[in-house]
Image (tube, rainbow, N blue to C red):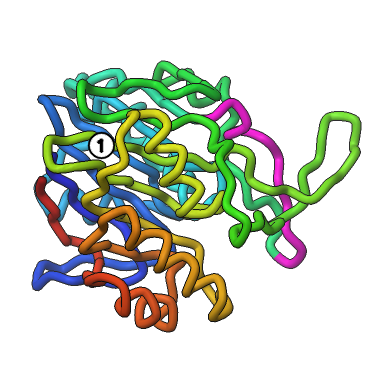
Amino acid sequence: MKITVLCDNNTITDVYLTGEPALSFFIEESGKNILFDTGYSDVFLKNAEELGINLLLTDYIVLSHGHIDHTGGLLHLKKMYDNARKDGIFCKKPVIVAHPEIFRSVTAEGFGDIGCPLKKEEAETFADVILSNEPVRITDNIIFMGEIVEKTPFETPVSAGILRDSAGNSAPDLQPDDSALLYSGNDGLVIITGCSHRGICSIAKEAAKICGRNEFRDIIGGLHLLGADEYRLYETGKFLKNLGLKKIHPCHCTDLAAKIALSEFFEVVDVGCGLVIEF
């Protein structure tokens, strides 16, 4: 498996790339091309072009959850596909894989709508769409985890917005659609996560349940530990270390204080646009 970081808060190579507070990874595994999240804008498209990655050959678009810093780029991706087909340029028809709540309407005070900018019907104009609460096998080794139902006592989901239904009723949004990818290799499990709103340790418990094994090799992505207190950071580090982790690649919504705290338990590797990780 090869993971290229297309979008993150910062850059990490000498190649001219652009960072933004969002996330997008390009994954190559078993002959399949998987785009994991699409960032906030068209930055991931520009970075992919700079890195020589043709996103028109994408087989799967996997969305970790609906927040716009992970799905905002779908508007630009759809436009790229529409223009390519109009101009007769070859492109695959990708399959979007996500939780059934991915297209729900979520707002946040001061920000307006922070949910996915496309509706399901719009997404279906350029891609097939698979929505599932249950795990979905992408390749022999990669699984979309579906709904995260496992819980840990120190990872209480926190509302990041207001959920509104068709009747106008509102409630705190606890990100029921938050999910991740799971790679099961000979040397252990690798979690590829967008924001970990459900809690990275809860995600790890779900991964072990799905695969029936508990040997972990790496975690790559956002851990949603911005401003986390010392208790949560300690419990998170202890829990993950007990999984056998020797190294992690936290980024996006993981601040410096969290990285320093976690480095007491295992190696923490810096992540940025252009980083390539291979297993």
**Which residue: 49% across, 30% down?**
146
Mark 1 packing: few (<14 Cα in 10 Å), some, or many (20+)?
A: many
On the question of residue 86 being in view, the answer is no
Name the spot of residue 119 as percent of width and height, x first: 59, 29
Question: In percent of the image, x 54 and y 80: which residue is there?
Answer: 230
Magenta residue span: 99-110
Reply above or below: 68 against 102.
Answer: below
* Prevailing SS of the magenta stretch: loop
Return the residue nearer the eye: 188 or 3. 188
Q: Quadrant of residue 108?
A: bottom right
Residue 269: percent from the left, percent from the top? 22, 70
Quadrant where the C terminus sits is top left
Q: Residue beneath label 1, please?
A: 183
Q: Quadrant of the N terminus?
A: top left
Q: Is residue 108 magenta?
A: yes
- Left or right: where 182 falls relative to 118: left
Residue kind at label 1, given as amino acid type? Tyr
Name the image quarter holding residue 57.
Answer: top left
Depth check: give the residue in front, 116 or 78. 116
Instruction: Classify 5 as above or below 99.
Output: below
228 drawn magenta:
no
Q: Is residue 32 left or right of residue 99?
A: left
| Secondary-structure class at tag 1 | strand
**In the image, is residue 238 above or below residue 129?**
below
